Amino acid sequence: MDNSKCALALWRLYEQLSEDGFLDEFPVEFIDPGEIKVDNHLIVFPNGARVELTAMECAIYRLFLRHPSGIRLDARWQHYSELLKIYGRESESSDTDWKERRIDDLCEDDSAHFSSHISHIRRKLQAVLNPVDVERFCIKKHTGGIYRIGALRR
């Protein structure tokens, strides 16, 4: 097993043990959400790696940066106004009705748009970051159905 696969397996084990209550915290340092910079659809990670996202992907990532404890996808309507405001700043369109329809579609209960955008973000992170950092900085499902960015200090 190469080093990156071994490190990834250890990260997943530590993460699971922590969520199950066997460890108080990871031996890997958590970071504050402000240590991840977001500027003009570009996410800049603490190690200097840069990932370019679409306006919608960037709005979703910003939403999760603002909520380090996570969000249940089935409760995303509770964040509708916040997401609309974030997307309004990210989108280059001046058509507010169009922006609202995009967020409506994203928050539809039977829609897979939200999950699809999370998958796209993950693939973009995989193209730039090492496997352990992908796991730390991607938005993914954790215990209790909560989606969050694992590396963030809660």
Image (cartoon, helix red, strand yellow):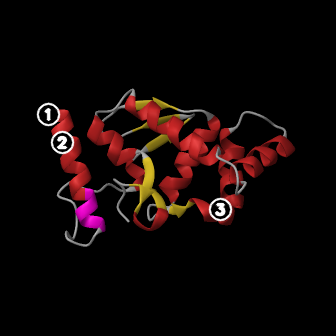
Q: Nearer the viewer, residue 115 or 45?
A: 115
- Say few, some or many: other residues with alpha carbon within 10 Å of mark 1 (under 14 / 14 to 19 / 20 or more): few
Q: CA distance from mark 2 to mark 1?
A: 6 Å
Residue labelled with disc 2? 7
Which picture quadrant has residue 99?
top right
Q: Is residue 88 left or right of residue 137?
A: right
Q: CA distance from mark 2 to mark 3?
A: 34 Å
Q: Residue at x 41, y 34 (%)?
A: 125
Q: Is residue 103 above or below residue 39?
A: below
Q: Do residues under tags 2 and 3 come within 8 Å of each other at their CB atoms? A: no
Q: Position of residue 119 (x, y in %)?
A: 51, 39
Question: What secondary structure is found at the residue carrying circle 2?
Answer: helix
Q: Is residue 129 left or right of residue 146?
A: left
Q: Nearer the viewer, residue 113 or 93?
A: 113
Q: Which residues are magenta?
A: 15-19
Question: What secondary structure is found at the residue carrying circle 3?
Answer: helix
Residue labelled with disc 1? 3
Is residue 46 in view? no
| Amino acid type indicated by mark 3 | His
Look at the image and say whether residue 154 sits in the magenta stretch.
Answer: no
Please give the label number shown on residue 130: none
Tell me the quadrant of the picture where the N terminus can be found.
Answer: top left
Q: Position of residue 61 (x, y in %)?
A: 52, 46
Magenta residues: mostly which secondary structure?
A: helix
Mark with earlier residue (3, 1): 1
Please give the label number shown on residue 79: 3
| Amino acid type indicated by mark 2 | Ala
Q: Position of residue 45 (x, y in %)?
A: 37, 39
Which picture quadrant has residue 21?
bottom left
